[in-house]
Image (cartoon, rainbow, N blue to C red):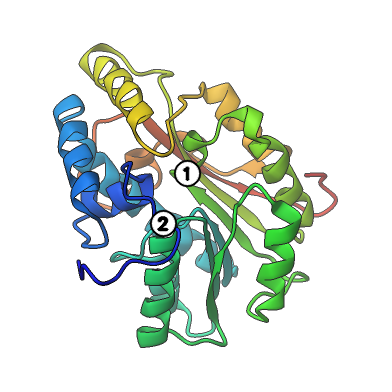
Amino acid sequence: MDPDFLPDAVDLDRPNVARIYDWALGGTANWAIDRQYGEQAVQAFPLAKTLARSNRDFLGRAVRYCLAEGITQFLDLGSGIPTAGNVHEVADDHADDSRCVYVDNEPVAVAHGRILLEETGDPDRHAVLYADLRDAEEVWEAALATGVLDPDRPMCLLSVAVLHFLPDVTGVREAIRDYRTLLAPGSAYVLSHATESGVVGEELAQIRRLVKLSERSSSPAVSRSLDEIAAFFGNFDVVEPGIVPVGEWRPEPGAATVPLASVVGGVGRKREGRFA
C-alpha cells in the first residue's frame, strides 16, 4: 500500500470492514490496524479467509446468473475495495455492454474504485459513488445521474456482505425496500448476510467470537436470523436453491463446497405486477 495514498476522511484510528475484507481477499488497500484486526479475526474464526473467498465466489456466480437472465446493468451497494472478481470485471467477461455503478461510504474503497476504473474501465459504462446506501433516494438519483444505468430496464441490485454491519435502527430495511420499489420488473436482488441460524458446534462459537470482536471496528456486526434475512427480499421471488450458505448457492460443477453455514446468500426476482 502506498503510504502517500490517504484519501480525505479516512479513519485510521479503528479498523475498517471494507479494508479488512480487502486484506482477507489478499488485497493491498489496507493499513496495519486493519491487518492486525484481520489476524485477530482469523484467530477467532480460523476459516475467516476461506469464508471471505466463498462469499466472493458467490458474488461472481450471482452476477453470471443475472447475465444469463438478460440483466446487464448492476448497482452494487457497499461494494467495498476493488479486488479480483469485481462485479464489472465478471460482467465484462460475459457481456461487453454491461454497466455497473458501485456505491460505498469508505473513502479508500471509493478512491481505489475510481483509480481502477480509470485504468481498466469504461467511464460510459462504469462509475463509483461516494454515498451511504441507506440514503436510497439520493443514491438512486446519483446513480442515474452518471448516465450509466437505465431505470426502465431490469437491473441487478447487490448488497453482498454489507447489511450485517447495519442494524435495523439505522433504517436499512426501509432503504432496501425503497430500492426494491424503484427497480423495474424483471430486476434481481442479490444478498449475502451473516447468520447464526442453522450454525452449530464450533462454527457457532467462532462466529459469535467474531461478532464480539467486530465491536472494536468502525462497523460492529449484527447477526440476523434466516427469517430476518429473507424479509429483505420483500415480495421478490427467491430463486432456487433459496437462501442457503453461500458455498451452496449454485456451485460450479465439480467445485468443492465450503462447509460453512454462517454466511448465507440468495437471489430474488421482481416479477411483472409484483409489489416490492
Q: Position of residue 246 (x, y in %)?
A: 37, 40
Q: Position of residue 19 (x, y in %)?
A: 31, 52
The three-letter amino acid code for the residue at tag 2 is: Gly
Residue that mark 2 sits on: 80
Residue 31's label in the rendered image is none
Residue 75, picture quadrant: bottom right
203 relative position to 176: left or right = left
Q: Give me the C-alpha separation between circle 1 and circle 2.
A: 9 Å
273 up-or-down from 130: above or below: above
Residue 69, picture quadrant: bottom right
Residue sitting nearer the eye, 6 or 66: 6
Residue 119, picture quadrant: bottom left
Residue that mark 1 sits on: 162
Say whether marks 1 and 2 touch (CB < 8 Å).
yes
For mark 2, does the 10 Å Cα neighbourhood hold few (<14), some (14 to 19), or many (20 or more) residues?
Answer: many
18 up-or-down from 96: above or below: above
The three-letter amino acid code for the residue at tag 1 is: Val
Q: Position of residue 128 (x, y in %)?
A: 52, 71
19 up-or-down from 246: above or below: below
33 relative position to 224: left or right = left
For mark 1, does the 10 Å Cα neighbourhood hold few (<14), some (14 to 19), or many (20 or more) residues?
Answer: many
Disc 2 on helix, strand or loop?
loop
Name the residue located 65 percent from the left edge and 47 percent from the top edge. Answer: 134
Q: Is residue 186 visible?
A: no
Name the residue located 17 percent from the left edge and 32 percent from the top edge. Answer: 40
In the rendered image, the quadrant that contains the C terminus is top right
Q: Earlier in the sequence, mark 1 or mark 2?
A: 2
Residue sitting nearer the eye, 245 or 253: 245
226 relative position to 134: left or right = left
Name the residue located 54 percent from the left edge and 54 percent from the top edge. Answer: 158
